[in-house]
Image (cartoon, rainbow, N blue to C red):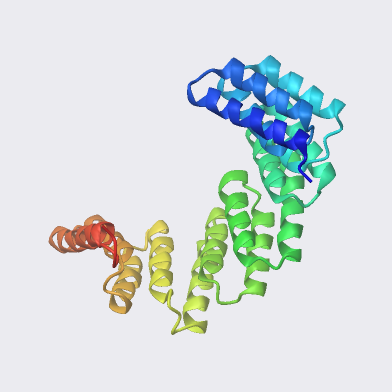
Amino acid sequence: MIDETKVRAESVLLKGLDDLEVGDYPAAIGSFWQAIAEVPEYREAWEHLAGALQRSSDDQGLDQAVLKAAELEIRSKEIWYALANALDGTKAQAAFWRALQIDPDYEQALTGLAWSLRTSGKKEEAIYVYEHLLDLFTRRQDPLSLNSLGDTLRRLVGALDLAEEAVGRALKLDPEYFDAWKNLSYVMCSRREPARAQQILRRFIQTYPAHRRRADAWVCLGTVLRSTGDLKGAEEAVRRAVEIDAECQLAWSKLSDILFELGHEQEAQVALRRADDLDYNQKYDETPGQT
């Protein structure tokens, strides 16, 4: 049996999308509201409404949309998430919280809320949300997300203890995950403990001598050594990377930088040309069937 109400709502939504294409925001917004009146939990209509109100800088319209969603007791986390993304500051945060009341493990809302809190100066509240993400990714046994979270916590939040915990959990799940080893070494650099950073990278190299990312590990070690002023040690490390993988563009680029710093200009120019050649080849190398 055809749901005539749904059919009417879809028809009105399509009209609104046509209005959007020609830049008629008032007509489009009116159509989206009409679709919502037919089907209050019509996710696509709410998403397009939020987007149209945001693009037309209609802050009052966005406030009205939030009030209407609350009045209708909308129970779709995706709708509240769409509204949150169209809002700023505390209004966005309130909408993200609405989505999380429906599903406390809704990753997109957790990530959006954490970002909003962090960028508005509410670091402690943001860390509370990041801790929930840490728990979520641990329960999900997701080393990639744990490592990415650790990177965010280190670079953008400055929560080094939590960053180390996230990366450590990633390594427990996947001990050979090189990017997590690299991130852990960077956490130590952020702590101004370069000796520990070196130890971490050397331990990876010794533990996994045949790892496919071992050249990258030597490059990272060279970067850490260079940051301490040990240019000769950095040069030796990066040369090891080149010995392992002569096609490693990053290794040649880093080697060039180090050689310039050491005053070995002729060698540096050779390394730089090699890095440029590899970069060009990687950029323009066509895959089979590519036109």
- The answer to whether 92 is drawn above or below residue 264 in the figure is above
In which quarter of the view is residue 40 placed?
top right
Query: Can residue 132 be seen at all in this image of the molecule?
Result: yes
In the image, taking residue 241 as reference, residue 281 lies left or right, namely left
x and y, in percent, of residue 37 in the image: 78, 26
In which quarter of the view is residue 256 placed?
bottom left
- The answer to whether 109 is drawn above or below residue 273 in the figure is above
Quick one: which residue is furthest to the left in this view? 266
x and y, in percent, of residue 110 in the image: 72, 46
x and y, in percent, of residue 264 in the image: 18, 61
Disc tally is: 0
- Picture residue at 57% right of the left edge, 54% below the top: 151
- Picture residue at 42% right of the left edge, 76% below the top: 214
- Picture residue at 54% right of the left edge, 61% below the top: 183
Q: Split into 4 quadrants, where in the image is the C terminus?
A: bottom left
x and y, in percent, of residue 77 in the image: 76, 42
Query: Can residue 85 be seen at all in this image of the molecule?
Result: no
Of residues 281 and 210, the one nearer the viewer is 281
- Picture residue at 70% right of the left edge, 50% below the top: 107
In the image, taking residue 73 as reference, residue 205 lies left or right, namely left
